[in-house]
Amino acid sequence: MKEEVNNENKYSDSGESLNIQELIFRYLAYWPWFVASVIACLAIAYVYLKFTVPVYNISATIMIKDDKKGGQMSSEMSAFQDLGLFADNTNFDNEIEVLKAKSLIKQVVYELNTYCRYSVRTGFVKSDIYTQSPLLITMDPTDNDSMKGSLEMEIKMLPDSSITVSGTYYSDEEKSFEQTVKTLPGFITTPVGRLTVAYRTDVPLLLDEDLFVTVAPAISVAKGYLGSLDISPTSKTTSVAILSFKNSNKQRGQDFLNKLVEVYNRDTNTDKNIVGIKTEQFINDRIAIISGELGNTEEQLESYKRDAGLTDIKQDAQLYLQENSEYEQKKIENGTQINLINYLNEYVRNPANTDAVIPANVGLQDVSLSALINTYNEQVLERDRLLRTSSPNNPVIQNLNTGIRALHGNILASITSVRKGLLITKDDIDRQAGKFSTRITNAPQQERILTSISRQQEIKSGLYLMLLQKREENSITMAATADNAKLIDAPLADSAPVSPRSKIIMLVAFVLGLGIPVGILYLFDLLQYKIATRHDVEKLTTLPILGDVPLNTDSKSRTIVVHENKNNLMSEAFRSLRTNLQFMLGTPDRKVILFTSTSPGEGKTFISTNMAVSLALLGKKVLMVGLDIRKPRLAEHFGFNKKADGITKYLSGGTDDLNSLIIKSNVTENLQILHAGVIPPNPAELLASPRLEQAMELLRKEFDYILLDSAPVGFITDPLIAGRVADLSIYVCRSEVTHKSDFELVNTLRKEHKLPHIAVVVNAVDLENKRYGYGKYGYGHYGKKYGYGYGYGYADAKKK
């Protein structure tokens, strides 16, 4: 058993070592397929590259203001922020998303007019001419938004400056139209709306070729541009972003990135100026009211002085007024703050201003209230900006609405609180001023009235001057608004296209050209359910393989192919089998060899017969015994009468003289035949009788080798019964006949030790079949063997 295992390992290792070599030989046999496949794939790749429009990558670098990452535009703007004129709070990630908004890109498409594509026919393809088009076609945004498909037109320009237009609108159904425009600028009436067409003054006319124009919905173009646009930050610590855009036209890509930054800055500045506009409106309203009140107070003072005949202030009244001046000043300041808080309270509570920003920096001294107003304005602006690119049901907008409502309530509460505080302060000032009232009771009534009127005049005048100052500050803020995005590197297109990549495509085509034949051959192998070569057998079992026998193509010798003094391919194959067989038998006392197969027609009788002849040619006494007593064919191979007595007569007890049943063969004198004889009614019982052991004992004494031609093991149990007298079992499988699943039975027989020392012979291997890795000069070791030992290979053997 140990020897058998070692032999199995040896054969298994040998098969593995030849695996790659066999695979290479198998595929090299089909080298015309590989050459044709590579040429075809490379030709297809060349045609693809020839007719595919190249796509270029256009990139630009911008810096976005971000307070957290220090993205200020300039030191001048920082100086204005220190004065409290700016309240920027920009988030870098949010701005990146705004740059990717479809509504923003759609606006860029409208302004660049890229929803219209111009092309001319160049060979078999249409070439995009972008700004080189002699015509400029525009469409009203309202009509464009209503488009559900694309509009394709073919325009012919005539020498008289007129044009003829024929087009089709592709939507739910195709709608065709034709029109002639005699003078330009003019209009083209289409099923989806009216187009304006005009000549470009800087581009010559195309009189010899037609102009093809495609008008697409701007939102569809914007979605396509969005898919080709990539915006990514350079790092996590900076507010610098790289804009990459892929397009088939370099100039169009550069124009798109420039216009995208321009439209973004314009929209951002518009958002920033909303607070300034609202503040300016509030200040102007307050100035108009204060101006009227101040004029009334001055007229009242003038009338009082004229009616009272006052020209100067008495010295004694001045002494009391000087003592009371400090409190009077406080009354003025307090009155100013009360008026401001009242004005602000009216504005906030006005239903018309519910969703508007609240005026800021109007002169309130309460810091917490001013901070609340600034926070409220920032959130209102953020919500309004997000509403342009999202729906009101967006969770982010809902959260902002909740925060805005809470801040609005807090502001109202803070206004009420501040007003109460100012009133308390006013009462306290009034109490302090009351201490001096007794000192001025004796003052003329005119002086007290004059002082009251003067106080009102000073309050109105101070409030008026302060509002004028705030209006100027707000105007400066609006005029000095800086762009939110600064262009660091202008858009620039790469010199080489990003697609198609010719080298990679040609390399892929070359690899694919090699891979297609490999895949086809591999698929053939997967679909092959029958064994073909020795390599297939090695993958199915670990049993030792004596060798493989080529397909017998000689029609003159269909049975006996081994002859004395002949060195053809078949003779050498059986010599190789004979050598391996002797090696496996080992000692001379092991001489009984059983031949079987899975099913009839696999060549077990052919192999056993020629193996017997090959052994006999060594000068050994060889006996061929026909144990296939159900369907005997041994007599047929050697030309005997199959009805003559054979081993069945001895097994059934019809005779005890076994030697009388042995017949000399007509091939060589060292080979004798003991064929099956008459077919018995009970073949299994005869093979199981002790007379089979008795027969083998007698024959072992007289012959050097005894070959038992048994029945197929896949159908009947006769070989398993006869296997008890054998020293070695030869399982014959046939290329293109034996199923791969049949080796499950052979492996089971070996595992359960139902047959002694099983070895495999692969029969009828077609050496000219390229699919199995054989070439013109034979397979593997055969070609080398015959070329070295006898000076000719398989092809030469066929000629002989």
Image (tube, rainbow, N blue to C red):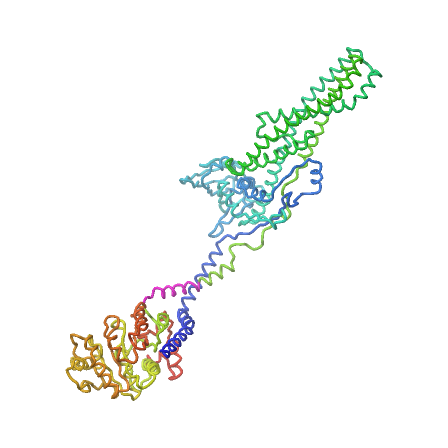
* Quadrant in the picture for the C terminus: bottom left
| Residue 635 seen in the current view | no
| Residue 232 seen in the current view | yes
Q: Residue 304, located in which quarter of the rendered image?
A: top right
Q: Residue at x 69, y 40 (%)?
A: 77
Residue 138 falls inside the magenta stretch: no
Q: Position of residue 788 (x, y in %)?
A: 40, 83
* Quadrant in the picture for the N terminus: bottom left
Left or right: where 401 falls relative to 470: left
Q: Position of residue 203 (x, y in %)?
A: 57, 44
Q: Is residue 314 above or below residue 206?
A: above
Q: Residue at x 78, y 19 (%)?
A: 436
The magenta span reads: 513-529
Residue 526 falls inside the magenta stretch: yes
Q: Position of residue 371 (x, y in %)?
A: 65, 34
Left or right: where 294 falls relative to 512: right
